[in-house]
Amino acid sequence: MGEALHAPFAQLLDPIDGLDNVLKEVDSSPRLEQPRLLFLRMHAEEPQLHALAELLTDLLVDYAIPLNKRRQANAAGSSSTTKGNTVMHARLYREAKRLLIEYEQANQGRYGELGELLSYALAVHHLGAAQIGSKMALKTS
């Protein structure tokens, strides 16, 4: 019974690969359970800020665009003549980018969306949280 209840939510879980390459958890003895402290990994004494920006850019479409729309783009690419057309994916990326930019321009005093995108990445990766909805699609004026 429990498995049947969790099956629909399991379909929403897409693990975020690469987050451990950018962020590292503070090691302590005994191990910290709460709060978990994370920091940017270093490379040649420089924090990997560009790697974090790339990771967040990669997650932007999943964060901003509803799952149905992403599934339609996947289906369109798979059903194309070449079976691998990515035009719809590029459009989704541009749409997600526009959503973020429009929000930022309308609210120049607030830059919380990037923080929320990072929070989304941490929740999915470290907590195994499912993405139930797309945040940007739920925004209201």
Image: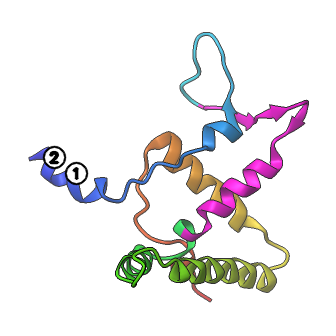
Q: Amino acid at mark 2?
A: Glu
Callout 1 secondary element? helix
Instruction: Work out whether residue 72 or residue 15 is closer to the camera in this orientation and state it.
Output: 72
Q: Amino acid at mark 1?
A: His
Q: Which mark is residue 6?
A: 1
Q: How many marks are shown on the rendered structure?
A: 2
Q: Magenta span has 56?
A: yes
| Occupied quadrant, residue 78 | bottom left
Q: Magenta span has 115?
A: no
Give the extent of the magenta segment.
35-61
Q: Contact (CB < 8 A) between labels 1 and 2?
A: yes
Which residue: 66% across, 19% down? 27
Q: Residues within 10 Å of mark 2 (few under 14, many from 20)?
A: few
| Occupied quadrant, residue 31 | top right
> Gap between marks 1 and 2, in whole Å?
5 Å
- Measured as percent of width and height from the top left, residue 76 is found at 40, 83
Which residue: 57% across, 70% down? 61
Q: Is residue 22 above or below residue 71?
A: above
The quadrant of the image that shows the C terminus is bottom right
